[in-house]
Amino acid sequence: MAQKPSIPKGTRDFNPEQVAKRNYIFNSIRGAFETFGFQPIETPSFENSDTLMGKYGEEGDRLIFKILNSGDYLSKIDEQAYINKDSLKLTSNISEKALRYDLTVPFARYVVQHQNEIEFPFKRYQIQPVWRADRPQKGRFREFYQCDADVVGSKSLWQEVEFIQLYDTVFSTLKLEGVTIKINNRKILSGIAEVIGASDKLIDFTVALDKLDKIGEAKVKEEMLSKGISEEGISKLQPLFTLSGSFESQIESLKTILSSSEEGTKGIEELAFINEAISELGLKTATLQLDVTLARGLNYYTGAIFEVAAPKTVHMGSIGGGGRYDDLTSIFGKPDTSGVGISFGLDRIYLVLEELGLFPETVTKNVDVLFINFGDKEALYCLKAIKELRSVGIHSELYPDSAKMRKQMDHANKRNIPFVVLVGEEEVNSNIYTLKNMISGEQFKVSLSELINHIK
C-alpha cells in the first residue's frame, strides 16, 4: 500500500493565496529596507557547526538542527567519547554542519570573511529561511523566514533611532496600527545584576527575567534561586517587577535604582537619548515603550534590545526583535566592529494580518481573464489577443484543452476569474471577441481595443 504523504512537524505547505499574501509582506518590508538605504545579501542555508554553536546561549544551542556528515560517519566516532557519554564531542564526530538558527551570526561571519570588499558602515538586509528544533505551536515553527536589517561599523545611537522609524514605517505600510516597540538596554541589565551582586550570573539572570511575561514573577524568582542568585539579591529586584508609567518616569526611577552602577547609568543615558530623538521626530502608528524586564536571552547583545508586540487585541508573541552587538564579529577574528540590527517575524506578522483582516483584496488577485478553448484555430486566434493583453499588464490565459464549455466555465468560477472570452468561428471571421462578465452575467461583443479597456 502506498505511503500516505506528510511533511515534518513545524513545517508547512503554502497554497497560491498564502504565497501571494506572504509576498505582500515581503515586498512591504523589502521596499522599506531599500528606502532606508539597506543593501541585500544572501548566505547559505547551512553553516559550519562551529560558526553557530556557542553564540545563542545554552538554550539556543539546543535548538540548532545538526546535519549528519555524509559517508561512513559512524566509523569516525571517538570510542572514549562514546564510553564517557560526551555528547559535545560525539556530535562533533558525526556532524560538522548545521542549519542556520538566525541570520545575524551568519551575517557576522560574512562581514569578517568579506571585510576587504565591504564599505563601512555597511547596511545590509537579508530575507531568508531559518530553522529551529523548537516545539511547534501557534506562531512558532521549525522552519520560518526572517527579514533582517543590520548596520555594522558604527556605534552611533542614531542607528537605533532609525531602526525604530523603520519598524514604524513597515507596520504603517501594512496598516497594522497599535504595534508596541519595546526597548531596553543590556547595560541596564548588567547594572541591575551588579547591584544585586549577581554580575557573574548575568546570563542566568537575563534568561530568567526574559520569561517574566510568560511564567510570572514567582516562577522567575524561583528560577533565579535555582541558578544560585541569592534571596537578598532577588529582593532588591522588587522595584523592577512593579516599574510602570511613562518612558520618562521609568528612566527617573532607574536612575535611583542604578545610581551606584556606572554601566547601568550609561545604559540609562543611551535610552534617554533614543527616546528624546523619537519624541522629537514622532512615529506614525507605533508606540515606543521602555520595558526593563526585556532581556532576550541571547549572549551577543551589548546595548539596546528591541522587541515588537502586536496590537493588544491579538494574542501573539513578538513579531520582531533585535539589538546592539558591539563585539559579535570578534568571535570570527574582527574585534571592535559594532553592529545593531532588527528582525521581522514574517510568519507571525502574517497570522496577525489574517486575524485582523488587513490583507488588501487585490493581494490575491490572479488571472483577469480566461479565454475559452473551442479548438486549435480559435486557440491560435485567442493567443494573439492574449499576447497583446499581457503586454499591457492584463493577466490572461487560455484554457489548455478544448473541453466541454461547462467544464471550462466552472474552472473560471472556481478560480474566481472575473472575465471569460468566447471565440468561435463567427468571432474569428469578424475579428471580434465575445466578453462575458462572470459576476454580472453580462455578455457583449467587442474589438481587441475595447476588450482591453473593459478588463483594465
Image (tube, rainbow, N blue to C red):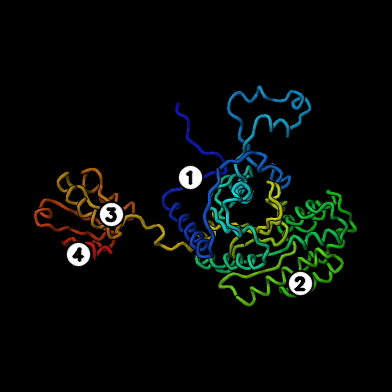
Return the x and y of residue 283 as percentages of the image width and height. 59, 73
Amino acid type at image mark 1 = Asp
Up/down of 266 relative to 344, above or below: below
Q: Is residue 221 left or right of residue 88?
A: right
Q: Which residue is mark 2?
A: 251
Q: Which residue is mark 4?
A: 450
Tag 2 and tag 1, C-beta contact below 8 Å: no
Amino acid type at image mark 2 = Ile
Nearer to us of marks 1 and 3 is 3
Tag 3 and tag 2, C-beta contact below 8 Å: no
Nearer to us of marks 2 and 1 is 2
Element type where label 2 sits in the image: helix
Residue 396 numbered mark, or none: 3
Q: Earlier in the sequence, mark 3 or mark 2?
A: 2
- Residue at (21%, 43%) from the top-left corner? 402
Gap between marks 1 and 4, in whole Å? 40 Å
Nearer to us of marks 4 and 2 is 2
